[in-house]
Amino acid sequence: MARRAPSGKSPATWGTVTLLMAVAIIGTLWVPVYARSLPKLSDFPFFYWYQLIWVPLTAVICWVCYLLLRTKPTRGARK
Amino acid sequence: MSHLNAVTFVIVVASFLTVTIVGFASARWRPAEDPMHLNEWGLGGRGFGTFVSWFLLGGDIYTAYTFIAVPALVYAGGAAGFYALSYTIMVFPIVFIFAPRLWSVARARGYVSPGEFVRGRHGSQGLGLAVAATGILATMPYIALQLVGIESVLTVVGIGSNTGNALVRDLPLIIAFAVVAAYTYLAGLRAPALIAFVKDILIYLTVIVAIAYIPGRLGGWGHIFSVSSAHLKTVNPATGKPFGSIVVLPAGEWAYASLALGSALALFVYPHAVTGVFAARRRDVIRRNAAMLPAYSLVLGLIALFGYMARAVPAVNADVKADGGNPQLSVPLLFAHMFPSWFAGVGDAAIVIGALVPAAVMSIAAANLFTRTIYRELISPYATPAQETRVARLASLVMKVGALGFALELNKTFSINLQLLGGIWILQTFPAVVVSLYTRWFHRYALIAGWAAGMTYGTVQAYRTSGGGQAHFGASAAPVFGHVTYIAIAALIVNLVVTAALTPLFRTIGLQDGYDETRPADYTADPVTVPAAAPRPKAPAM
């Protein structure tokens, strides 16, 4: 039968996850922050390298949130 | 480009034959006890772990749009086209938030498509139908876009172009598509899942080599950016304004942000993305993939930069002009002029296979929607799983023929715009699909009214928008209160306002809420076993 994952994570955990997710979304949603060409990173205008750096940043944020929300396998669960 | 490059052509054909063999062989991959069940044909047995899901989702959501349309935008208009990178960055936090709930309720209740969830959640057949019809409608031009991507490769390789005879010109495309239709029919979701491995190897190989090799040949990134910047500053004779800019201008910021956000919200309500999510084995697979899929976003960002590289190659510019100024040829032309013939073939094969995988998943997703939400609800309520699977197989063929019609009948710019229109449409199912994961506060009839209002507003606005030499459906962003905004976002706001306003009204006048067949625990369920079959709801659906 269906096994239910316990959803009981503390409000602090959910708060942290919500905050991190908001940061990850706003990071590139707020265009005026990065719509500029300086400072350059080697030959790349700021506009480009800022967004490219957000790619791994988002990945790390999602991974941290995954670890925060991960539920340990319940007793008796098999792989 | 009118002459056939034999080496490139042979590599592309050989790659196509390889994935054809993989496609047919995939029917025997992870064999099912009962292959004639929609969980098997339509969702590959709902058993894909993190590794396979990563390839399948990546192969599914990064399409010809990524490889052809986005660099074409950057080639033609500069920074404005980069919204696609921003979009694929913010899409994963969004997926991380709601997709696990959608996966859980679908797994617990045996749903194979978003339409079924909406029908079950609100006890409303009408709302389920609206979601299903929107999904099918929005998917058709998206598949057509994949064909346009394949077409641009064929044009550059030297087949399928410059022939007066329409049948001869389109024959390679028709043959390729017929072959894909055949193995999708046979193997279902297993075929694109397995082919996605081939696709990704070719894509990553091409991108890594291109990034390492081409800028050096062109005199470095500094030169590439300065050539592009100089071009973008020149005035476009058609509009009397510059072609674009190397950094988004203040006037374009709102459009940039709304296009990114709108596309990100829309992506995972598209049926093909939902299908990829539902095929996962466990709930955690989705969250892990939200952290691992950005690897593809990096690839998308680098491919977008191909647009600037192409601009820095005079021969590419000349060939684009010679073909009537079609910027969608810029990436295949970049390969043709910068790589030796054999590696240009690898790059072209990557684009072709990169378009075939999503085309297959999209037709399966639309078939799942049709079968469960339209066929089973309206035509044959007591269909057996085997009958459902047969119907879905046929529906996938119909979807492909329809998309082929789109691609052959309409001109290329138009089908890109239809895809943007698809984004406007699919986003109107967001309140019914995503908001309903959290609350049933919205009344079912209010959701239908909001959906209708959003669809109407979005379609009318898109129709009234001119651009690219077309009077109608010319662009996907239009001025709203003085800001140029992605129409999908404006329509979603209309949709939500109507839904929120009508909900209390409908409750006040005593319109009944539907029966909710889901239970709160369903949304966090993480069942180990696959549900055998979707049971019919006991209460008659309204």
Image (cartoon, helix red, strand yellow):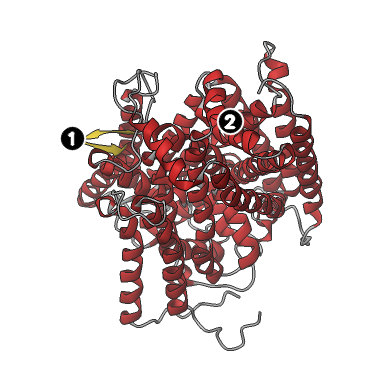
Dot 2 falls on a residue whose secondary structure is helix
B362 left or right of B505 in image: right
Whether residue B520 is situated above or below residue B264 in the rendered picture: below
**Residue B330 seen from this side:** yes
B411 left or right of B12 in image: left
Mark 2 and mark 1: span between their CA atoms?
Answer: 34 Å
Q: Amino acid at mark 2?
A: Val
Count of all numbered marks drawn on residues in the image: 2
Query: Mark 2 packing: few (<14 Cα in 10 Å), some, or many (20+)?
Result: many
Dot 1 falls on a residue whose secondary structure is loop
Residue B222 vs residue B505, the one in the foreground: B222
For residue B341, which quarter of the picture? top right
Say the numbered circle drawn on residue B482: 1
Residue B464 position, x and y percent, is 31, 23
Q: Amino acid at mark 1?
A: Gly
Whether residue B232 is situated above or below residue B521 in the rendered picture: above
Query: Can you name the residue that lies furthest to the left here?
Result: B481
Q: Earlier in the sequence, mark 2 or mark 1?
A: 2
Query: Mark 1 packing: few (<14 Cα in 10 Å), some, or many (20+)?
Result: few
Say the numbered circle drawn on residue B148: 2
Which residue is located at x 77 percent, y 39 percent?
Answer: B11
